[in-house]
Image: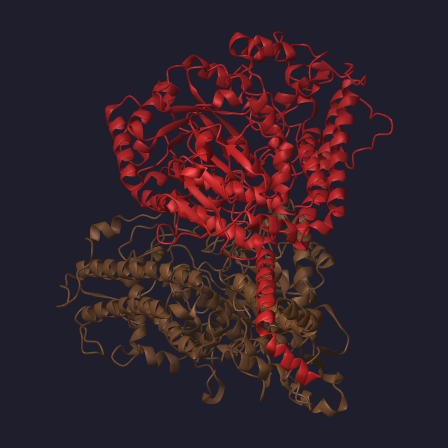
Chain colours: A brown, B red
């Protein structure tokens, strides 16, 4: 028997070998997939193997990879990603996709390119050719790259290719990440370890994870990266660092990412030995021109400079009696037609008597039309500072002759650091979709529409942590930022579902409830931190935990009490005509919605109005009771998130499930802390009793006020 | 044919299946191995699959895992590691090892335990049982753990088990890593990213890599970890941090690692609100006693305190007119029988007129016999500060009534950071093997022998970098430190070979030449940085690059010129009787070897002697020419290392090979820089021409002196 078996087996070697090869290939893909995925390092580019039926259906639409047109580093990057993705998902190699530049399709398929006419750079179409095989068609190489990633996303999210026909193009030209990373590796407001940039080893050694970083960015359409902190070190402009930056630019170019620098405005003094940085001084102008020339010699496609000037102690043109436009235009001239200056609108004056949220508008509105054509003004989503909820910034729509960029914060400085699950797509979608009231002839002009000549910048949440972002769900915010910058009309739920499918499991029994929870998570943070339009109630400096009682900081607008204005009689900041009248900075058609406390959306109530504690809210409760109810709602939402995650254990690998569960436990504790400390303080100020049936805070107000966290991360 | 093939194939399913399973299992192991190994994260615990012949031979000595005696968290850790290792190396599961406590062997095998009698804790024997199967026998659970790792090392290094009979026990009781990690994640003298400890997330979340860290330590016998910087923050002693530390202690306990803290001597003032930290003050003594009690309630096996006092600005007992013994004994009493105080001997006084290398001896020699029995004095390997080469510290052998610990620096503060390949085992072996001259009746008393009641501490080189240590070859220094602390008699070559086999490839065509290069690499650094006994010629503060010209620092002993004493007439520090007479701190039988420049080992020449530039060295060359020849020898050695590594590409996966090649390119450039800058400076001081045929420095002396590196890592 043994002899016969062996002999017969030997005769079957080709069959055995074939079966084994198939099995081994798929097993290897699984092994590799598991090894990659379990720690979160693979991000949404995890490419988990497909179930058999889907794999067969997808396979039927693929074939040998083909490229119509010349190969380039960018088409090679696209093909390499397609191989990586389909090999992992299908468990075999050799299957691929047709990539074709619009003008180079063979006759029978030339119609495929028609919808691409007039699309901006990066647009693509994914559709079936006459033979049923899937093709990615684009006007340019970057379109082929984006189309390839879109195709992989489509399949990785669980869809098949049988009726695919997708045409897409970016709504905004600049889709940028801003890194608040210092050259020494510290990340301001970073909660995921140190910087991903190891400048010390560049240009000699490039960490391969910087290629993975660029792949992740390219997969969601990000095309620009500011590599250093807006509180900028002049070191980044020295020849030694330009050489380092050039190595990075070379590595990222095939993935469509341009490098940018935050420029320290005083660099001509700091590095150049000049006695001034006055933007109208000829020597200063020469210094910047020479510096720009030096950079462009090393990096021909250098993006340009991002500048934080005359804000929070940074140098700027006002040091020399010049305007922001003088400063920006001087740098714009140095760059010439080669690059762009992005000038931040985030300024507020020390000791000003006016309302802090009015300052950027007051400073920049008069400069509309004064900026050079290669200057973009970068405006935060709201007029304060990345709070859990703010109304949109009144500069959007109010600067028709200025290119605008919206600055969002992906890192969660004010929303629980890396540990709280707070999906930010709803926050950004709320801002992007807001009607500014500045449309012509009564038509809507949304915030997103005002960005058409600029774009969106997100303050990155990446770090050296293995999973990039500290919390696994923080990856979703990086992802959502890119997806919304590509298409501001995407819904938060849609983004959440496709992210969850790629990152954890394609099973709708997982993605549907998880996406629902993600979409609700931001309101939960608003509720347990700063409900009803409250803002900036966080701990001093580090912004960790509740501190609504703090009133002793040197600048009035740094104090939580400046924003809550809570006293015996009431709470809230009167920004109507009877108060700071910040409301007047909005178009009348918008302002009218926030003018009347009785009818307005109460999510913004205390942002605009100071009201008595016994004011009756729309729920019928007094303001005090409504406030308590909102805190309780936030806490209950986090409790529910943690319970739901425990129920979903079977869909997620053990390590990542435990990681998230650990973080949700932290969030639960901290949500209760926020609620308890806030109620303890406001109750004491108001002299109000807790509503019947309400849980008493776990500690005394003194205890909450005594907490100190000198070690909170991210605080410069 | 197809039909027949299929039918026949179907008939063979069991055979096919069996073959496939075997293939898949080994393939998966390979895939997993590759995925783990290619970035260096797996360290020497990579467990690469064995070749077929070795696997068969090893398999024959294994069987179902068995444990004689009760299971414990520690035996579970041992069994888990054995499964992990053998599954990966053999490509199958179910094969295992017999673990037996000495008293619990069945009758026929009880003789196996005989060599264990009287061995210290952690000793083990690996041998064959009567049935030929391999057993690990030990007196205690930690011995079983160490024996399991030793067995895995044996197999992973490429040996088979046919005649295995190894008995081993640790030579030194304390085998410790000192982390110079601050609570905020910064690592003083760290070159591998930020700290591996994310204190912010503890105790709620424990990074799984901290378990891998403990596994790596246990595998080489390390049993103690000081988790924070000797320049200590009092924050580490607060209740919040004790809770964090307890989580770590719980996680590490099964792997035999005890946690220790660096204690800030002024903590009773900083945290306790006292007005003094005087060690003789009753309130201070009470504060420390209470603090120790608090710690032991949370961590019953807490190791104790490491203290840097009255050194480089740190607080200490001398602030109150007390001695180091007063300070150490006060803390020792607070710990009581529960723990140990490790007191650092690294002190030097400001503005002292004497020779800095004499200060520790002068300070501590008079205190011999004055320390409590649970105090250990921690002495650096040499009397200066972790230089590429120093003579051993004169305190070794001179403190017969004091427990001593040798402090080595694994992180390469003075040996090229993480980028230079410098294997430190030869440096440490040189110190450990030195005869102190203090033996009785003319017998040798080596430095290692003086540590029998103490141990070895190594300043860790770990960080958040994926490969833990920045450079792949820096892993070898962590490994070598542990191996030498277990057995100071191991040769550097032996350690290098077993490390290289486990880490890269078992092929002797790889391990033999690589080990030879590693062993020579330390002398190369000595040659290109500080040849002939020079020391401390590094750049100010960060210690990066050459700066032999620096003479303007506020403390004389911070200046390289203080150490080189180079002038028109000669170079070197006269430490003989005509100079500082530091030589007199050594036993006469040792001092005599260094007293005569003409006959001594010239590796220490300028450490002990100031000599004319035209002094004739043993090579027949003048001192100046010998100096140049040594620099050139160092540079040539690095050039050769880089060339050799390029030749060995076929033995190493592509990513790690490229990583190392990148770093060797940096080392080459920096070795040339060191040589060129040093020759430019000393040549100018001496007024000497370059020897004929010698390469001229690439730049002028001015150029070298103008280099600035404000961004060099690790500098506090």
Q: Looking at the image, is A540 positioned above or below residue A170?
A: above
Q: Nearer the viewer, residue B684 or B492?
A: B492
Residue at position x 37%, y 50% from top?
A: B202
Residue A400 lies, with reference to residue B38, above or below; the image says below
Horizontally, residue B309 falls left or right of residue B508, namely: left
Q: Quadrant of residue A166?
A: bottom right
Question: What residue is drawn where x is 68% and y is 56%?
Answer: A247
Image position, residue B504 (x, y; %): 64, 47
| Quadrant position of residue B417 | top right
Picture coordinates of residue B37, whole percent (x, y): 59, 53
Judge by depth and name the residue closer to the eye, B21 or A282: B21
Quadrant of image for the N terminus of chain B: bottom right
Q: Residue A525 versus residue A322: which sits nearer the camera? A: A525
Residue B267 horizontal side relative to residue A302, left or right: left
Image position of A444 (left or right of A686): right
* Residue A475: % across, % down: 48, 65
Residue B686 appears in the picture as rendered: yes
Residue A395 x/y as whole percent: 46, 72
């Amino acid at each position: 028997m043994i002899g016969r078996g062996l002999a017969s087996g030997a005769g079957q070697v080709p069959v055995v070998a074939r079966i084994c090869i198939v099995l081994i290939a798929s097993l290897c893909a699984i092994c590799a997939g598991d090894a990659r995925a379990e720690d979160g390092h693979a991000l949404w580019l995890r490419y988990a193997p497909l179930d058999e039926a889907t794999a067969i259906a997808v396979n039927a639409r693929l074939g040998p990879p083909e490229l119509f047109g010349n190969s380039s580093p960018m088409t090679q990057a696209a093909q390499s990603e397609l191989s990586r993705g389909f090999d992992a998902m299908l468990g075999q190699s050799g299957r691929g996709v047709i990539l074709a530049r619009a003008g180079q399709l063979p006759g029978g398929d030339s119609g495929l390119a028609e919808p691409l006419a007039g699309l901006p750079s990066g647009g693509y179409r994914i559709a079936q050719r006459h033979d049923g095989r899937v093709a990615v068609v684009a006007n340019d190489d970057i379109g082929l790259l984006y189309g390839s990633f879109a195709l992989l996303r489509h399949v990785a999210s669980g869809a098949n290719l049988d009726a695919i026909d997708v045409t897409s193009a970016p709504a905004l030209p600049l889709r940028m990440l801003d890194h608040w990373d210092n050259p020494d590796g510290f990340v301001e407001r970073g909660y995921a370890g140190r910087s991903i940039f190891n400048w010390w080893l560049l240009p000699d050694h490039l960490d391969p994870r910087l290629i993975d970083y660029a792949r992740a960015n390219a997969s969601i359409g990000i095309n620009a990266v500011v590599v250093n902190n807006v509180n900028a070190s002049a070191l980044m402009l020295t020849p030694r660092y330009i050489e380092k930056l050039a190595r990075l630019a070379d590595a990222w170019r095939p993935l469509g990412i341009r490098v940018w620098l935050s420029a320290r405005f005083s660099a001509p003094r700091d590095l150049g030995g000049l006695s001034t940085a006055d933007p109208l001084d000829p020597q200063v102008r020469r210094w910047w021109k020479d510096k720009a020339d030096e950079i462009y010699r090393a990096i021909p496609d250098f993006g340009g400079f991002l500048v934080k000037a005359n804000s929070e102690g940074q140098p700027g043109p006002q040091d020399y009696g010049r305007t922001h436009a003088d400063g920006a235009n001087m740098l714009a001239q140095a760059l010439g037609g080669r690059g762009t200056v992005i000038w931040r609108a985030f300024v507020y004056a020390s000791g000003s008597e006016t309302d802090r949220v009015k300052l950027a508008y007051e400073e920049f509105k008069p400069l509309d039309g004064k900026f050079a054509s290669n200057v973009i003004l970068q405006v935060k989503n709201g007029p304060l500072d990345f709070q859990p909820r703010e109304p949109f910034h009144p500069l959007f729509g109010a600067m028709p002759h200025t290119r605008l960029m919206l600055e969002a914060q992906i890192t969660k400085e004010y929303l629980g650091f890396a540990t709280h699950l707070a999906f930010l797509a709803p926050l950004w979608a709320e801002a992007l979709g807001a009607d500014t009231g500045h449309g012509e002839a009564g038509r809507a002009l949304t915030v997103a529409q005002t960005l058409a000549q600029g774009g969106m910048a997100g303050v990155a949440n990446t770090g050296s942590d293995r999973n990039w972002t500290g919390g696994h769900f923080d990856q979703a915010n990086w992802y959502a930022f890119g997806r919304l910058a590509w298409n501001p009309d995407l819904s938060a739920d849609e983004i959440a579902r496709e992210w969850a499918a790629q990152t954890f499991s394609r099973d709708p029994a997982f993605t549907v409830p998880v996406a629902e929870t993600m979409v609700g998570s931001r309101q939960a943070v608003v509720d347990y931190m700063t409900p009803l339009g409250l803002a900036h109630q966080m701990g001093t400096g580090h912004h960790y935990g509740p501190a609504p009682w703090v009133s002793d900081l040197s600048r009035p607008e740094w104090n939580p009490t400046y924003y809550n204005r809570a006293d015996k009689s009431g709470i809230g900041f009167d920004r109507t005509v009877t108060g700071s009248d910040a409301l007047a900075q909005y178009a009348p058609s918008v302002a009218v919605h926030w003018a009347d406390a009785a009818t307005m959306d109460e999510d913004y109530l205390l942002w605009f109005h100071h009201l008595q504690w016994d004011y009756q809210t729309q729920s019928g409760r007094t303001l005090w009771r409504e406030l308590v109810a909102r805190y309780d709602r936030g806490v209950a939402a986090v409790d529910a998130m943690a319970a739901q995650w425990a129920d979903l254990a079977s869909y997620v690998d053990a390590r990542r499930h435990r990681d998230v569960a650990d973080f949700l436990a932290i969030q639960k504790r901290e949500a209760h802390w926020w609620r308890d400390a806030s109620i303890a303080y406001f109750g004491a100020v108001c002299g109000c009793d807790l509503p019947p049936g309400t849980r008493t805070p776990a500690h005394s107000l003194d205890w909450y006020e005594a907490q100190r966290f000198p070690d909170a991360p991210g605080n410069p």
